Amino acid sequence: MDKNQSIITCKDVSTDRLKDISFELRRKQIMTIVGPSGAGKSSLLFLLNRLEEPISGKIYYLGQNIKDIPVTQLRCEIGMVFQSAYLFDGTAEENIQYGPKMSGKLEDCNVDRLLDLVDLPKSFKMRHVTSLSGGEQQRVAIARTFANKPSVLLLDEATSALDIKTTEHIEELLIRLRDEKEISILMVTHNLKQAERMGSQTLYMEEGKLIERGMTTRMFAHPETNHFEKFLKE
Ligand SMILES: Nc1ncnc2c1ncn2[C@@H]1O[C@H](COP(=O)(O)OP(=O)(O)OP(=O)(O)O)[C@@H](O)[C@H]1O
Ligand SMILES: [Mg+2]
């Protein structure tokens, strides 16, 4: 597949909280999204997963308007991980099997392999998720998302409740998944160091608008807008 292929294209998208958002996410790209609280970062991710709908503009996944893709299929291919793991009451295995079970593909779901992918031992299968640490729960949440074999991962402050060491582990995991599974990642974070470490491209949002975007290293070294420059100094 073309390395530079656009996986997600957002074209002039507006909602009551977002104004004219356009960007492209490419294969194997990690794009970080930063901006003050209330800027519309989560709202943007919700649109890509059809948890919300645009008022105007279009969103394409692999060239197809996401409105024309069945929602369950879209949410398998574009997986989302939130700040809290949102696991349901049950074992790690039950949580990981949930998506494949819903789409009738339970036989394709290798729980041992998925646990291994997120560096958890097989013995965790039968562990009740309430007995796991925050970092372990977040790994189960990532494994559960990966059970659906996504090509895109949307992360909304997925490590903000975790300590530095666990955050580093999850970051390594994400980079490995990007390399091995060739997924693209769109990552909202309040941690500017993380946005700089992880991103190849960055979007800076404010009041529902995309104020600045570009290569992460360039943006953090030489912000082009006063808005982003000020944000970096705060
Ligand atoms: N369900 C909702 N109904 C109405 N307004 C909402 C809703 N959710 C968020 N908003 C508003 O939309 C704006 C953008 O919110 P959003 O949650 O996308 O911001 P954010 O950048 O993710 O902020 P944070 O960094 O605090 O998570 C805010 O002004 C917020 O109050
Ligand atoms: Mg948010």
Image (cartoon, grey):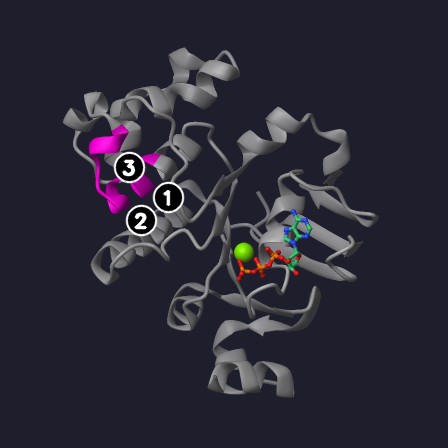
Circle nearer the N terminus (2, 1)? 2
Q: Position of residue 131 (x, y in %)?
A: 20, 32
Confirm whether the magenta stretch covers residue 135.
yes
Confirm whether the magenta stretch covers residue 27.
no
The answer to whether 231 appears left or right of 101 in the picture is: right
Asked if the residue under mark 3 is in contact with the one under mark 1, i.e. CB atoms within 8 Å, the reply is no
Q: Mark 2 = which residue? A: 173
Q: Mark 3 = which residue? A: 117
- Note whether ligand 2 is within 8 Å of mark 3: no
Main SS, magenta region, reads helix
How far is mark 2 from mark 1, CA to CA? Answer: 10 Å
Q: Which residues are magenta?
A: 129-140
In this view, the mark in front (1 or 3): 3
Q: Which mark is residue 201?
A: none
Q: Residue at x 59, y 48 (%)?
A: 2
Circle nearer the N terminus (1, 3)? 3
Label 2 sits on what residue type?
Leu
Q: Mark 1 = which residue? A: 180
Q: Position of residue 143 (x, y in %)?
A: 35, 34
Q: Secondary structure at mark 2?
A: helix
Q: Residue at x 64, y 38 (%)?
A: 51
The answer to whether 112 appears left or right of 197 in the picture is: left
Identify whether 209 is placed above or below 136.
below
How far is mark 3 from mark 2, CA to CA? Answer: 8 Å
Label 1 sits on what residue type?
Glu
Location of residue 11 (image quadrant): bottom right
Closest to the observer: 197 or 17?
17
Q: Ligand 1 is in which quadrant of the figure?
A: bottom right
Identify whether 123 is placed above or below 18.
above
Closest to the observer: 29 or 167?
167
